[in-house]
Image (cartoon, helix red, strand yellow):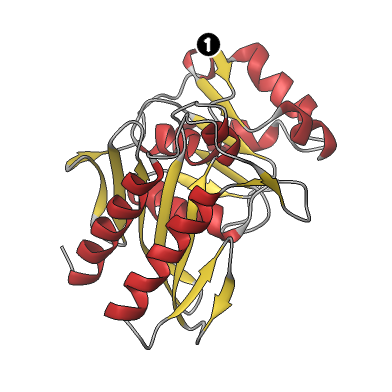
Amino acid sequence: MSPMLEFALNAAYIAGRGTLKHFDAGIAVDLKSDQSPVTVADREAEALLRSMIRASYPTHGILGEEEGTEGSQNERWVIDPIDGTKSFITGVPLYATLLSFELDGEPQFGVAYFPALDTMVCAAKGEGTYINGRRCRVRQNDDIGAAIICTGSFDSLRKRGLHEGVAKLSEQAMFSRTWGDAYGHCLVATGRADMMLDPVVARYDVSSIKVIVEEAGGSFTSFSGETGIFSEAVSTTPALRDQVLAAFRP
């Protein structure tokens, strides 16, 4: 394990554990300009991660959900202090602290720590994906009838015009659940679900997720099949990728 990945694991763990003092504690919720919720826990976790990065890697840039960009963006850390704030504020434990490192826009490694579950998922390019120190891979299932679907919110899918495609897949699959955000993508990476259909994402939501899913042998694309990081994300297994993407074609 590289020293930088070891740093990322430690930093995400410390920041994530710090959110627990606010979790399920009835804390105040503010609304950002886009009407998404934010709490003192989000702000504290990002501030802590930024201070740790500045102390250890002062020449690196940072992109964070709450405080934006600072420094050079060629070598940068990408922070989502609480991915799944809506879960966090309602006492649902499926939220994560996300941290990745990008080189010229490409994630080199990523960490997803789920504090309320005490579960750590991480990956580095060329080194595989691990959950709590154990190697993991996507499911080896090529039967859509046995597939497990995870999605983002139904309202977002409807607004993006993706709900009919999800309905087609759900009619064929074993079952579908809205185990959204980083948790859904990590279910794919750890072999516990076959696809995560995420209609609205920002870079800090999926920078770490991209390398986690791909290093687990999975496919990470847009709904039209483009590779990279966009404002939407589909994580799936290679065996079902074409069937999944076909459901969203006109």
**Disc 1 crowd, CA 10 A, few/some/many (<14, 14-19, 20+):** some
Residue on which the image places disc 1: 174
Give percent across and percent down for residue 97.
42, 49
Q: How many marks?
A: 1
Taking 240 as reference, is 174 above or below it?
Answer: above
Taking 148 as reference, is 127 above or below it?
Answer: below
Residue visible at 73% across and 27% down? Answer: 154
Query: Label 1 amino acid?
Result: Met
Q: Quadrant of the C terminus?
A: top right
The reply, left or right, for residue 22 in relation to residue 13 is right
Residue visible at 36% across and 79% down? Answer: 54
Q: Is residue 112 visible?
A: no
Task: Decide which of 250, 100 is in the foreground and name it.
Answer: 100
Task: Decide which of 200, 17 is in the foreground and name it.
Answer: 17
Give percent across and percent down for residue 130.
24, 44
Under circle 1, the secondary element is: loop
Taking 12 as reference, is 61 above or below it?
Answer: below
Give percent across and percent down for residue 224.
70, 48
Task: Decide which of 88, 120 is in the foreground and name it.
Answer: 88
The reply, left or right, for residue 52 in relation to residue 246 is left
Residue visible at 78% across and 30% down? Answer: 155
Residue visible at 28% across and 53% down? Answer: 14
Q: Quadrant of the N terminus?
A: bottom left
Taking 250 as reference, is 220 above or below it?
Answer: below
Quarter-of-image position of residue 133:
top left
Quarter-of-image position of residue 156:
top right
Q: Is residue 154 visible?
A: yes
